[in-house]
Amino acid sequence: MTKRSLFFALLTTISAWAQGDPAPAPPAPPVTPPVAQAAPAEDASIPDDGVRVAILGYHDLSEGQTETAMRIRTSKFRQQMESLRQLGLTVISLPDFIAWKKGEKTIPPKSVLLTFDDGWKSVYTDAFPILKEYNYPFTLYLYKNYIDGGGKALTLPMINEMVAAGATLGSHSVSHPYPVTIKKFRKEGVDKYDTFLRKELGESKRFIESKFPGSKITTFAYPGGFFTEEMFPLADEFGYTHLFTVLPGKVKRGMDSKTLPRYMILGNYDKIFEYATTFREAGASAPDDPAAGPGSPPPAPPTPYPVSPESGAVINTRLPEISADLSTLTNYDPASLSMKIGGFGEVPAVFDPVTKKLSWKLNRRIRQQSCEVSITWKDTATGKPHSTPLRWSFRIDRNAAYQPDGE
């Protein structure tokens, strides 16, 4: 699948669940792709400081229920939080993000912002204990009609406890309207649409601030990522300074703050988390990102385990030995280890039980300028494939390793 087709498949998947309402609701209307279909605009007058922020969006969690686009397994969520630590990524707070975006503060060049949409009770029961364990700040995007909504909804005491522990709050509208509902009001004329938007954007902000007096609501997450231009002046009027879509991509300081990208982490598609946590050198867009253009270079993120050639290395041979030192890896079945190499597929890599090294010496030359490697394994605790495989890439020095096509 090409990056372009993957990107539009992703948007379709996100749109399918984003239009849904976690509270009991009638069957969802036909899928309508989000408005956000192009990369966010940038202000050329704001110098690029090289910092990139990946904003991760979560919904429901459960260890026992089937994973869906909206629901992620609690153990997988824990693994993802551990991956952030192993990758050396800094989880920042919403206030720090805003201060950086305004040019008032510096943050690490590879930062992550954690957000949770709607107000699912599982954020309190499942995610909150893990976030406290890792000391990760996070933001809740709540919509009025689901707060204290019973069943699977967060209660006011739960939200207050998380706020007291450092969580920040943002608005997610009053009713979490379907895109079809927004379009319906828009077709009914300027006045009715204005009244509708004022309620969804304004009343939600007033309600949250009244229930949580210490919280000043200045950010908004578009339900389903759906927005129209009429929302922008109202956002200014109500004091929203930063608004978030569901278009995946890294945030740069100069990006339009009314259409900021977010990676919505799907429970049934792990690639999104991989895209979100892959950073290139400062000053470049994230590679292999669904929003990146065709022909982007392969990723070179740090790896949690020593590998050879190293991630991002430039080597002068097209017949290297590729290996990974897995001596610190735990809870895995050695028989399940699998190495795949771009252009070769799965290869017969050998695992040394003494050194815990998995390796394979190439038996034919790498023809591409870059080479991507992935290693997967099964978790002994669950018997299922580990949710975050080991992935890295390296490059070939074309001049030093040049070989005629016939060789």
Image: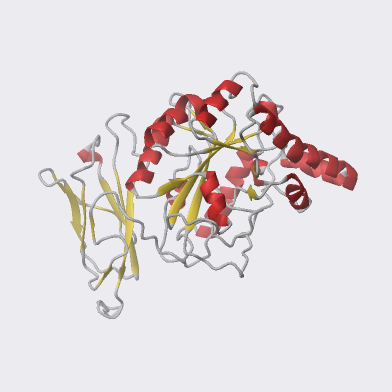
- In the rendered image, the vertical position of residue 82 relative to residue 89, given as above or below: above
Horizontally, residue 70 falls left or right of residue 325, namely right
Which quadrant, please, contains the C terminus? bottom left
In the image, residue 303 lies at what x, y percent?
30, 52
Q: Residue at x 63, y 50 (%)?
A: 242
Horizontally, residue 349 falls left or right of residue 391, namely left
In the image, residue 325 lies at what x, y percent?
19, 50
- Residue lying furthest left in this view? 354
299 vs 401, nearest the viewer = 299
Q: Residue at x 44, y 23 (%)?
A: 64
- In the rendered image, the vertical position of residue 350 relative to residue 208, given as above or below: below
Q: Residue at x 63, y 55 (%)?
A: 257
Q: Can the viewer see residue 183?
A: yes
48 vs 13, nearest the viewer = 48
In the image, residue 379 lies at what x, y percent?
29, 35
336 vs 269, nearest the viewer = 269
- In the rendered image, the vertical position of residue 312 relative to residue 257, given as above or below: below
In the image, residue 392 lies at what x, y percent?
33, 56
332 vs 30, nearest the viewer = 332
- Residue lying furthest top in this view? 150
Q: Can the viewer see residue 5?
A: no
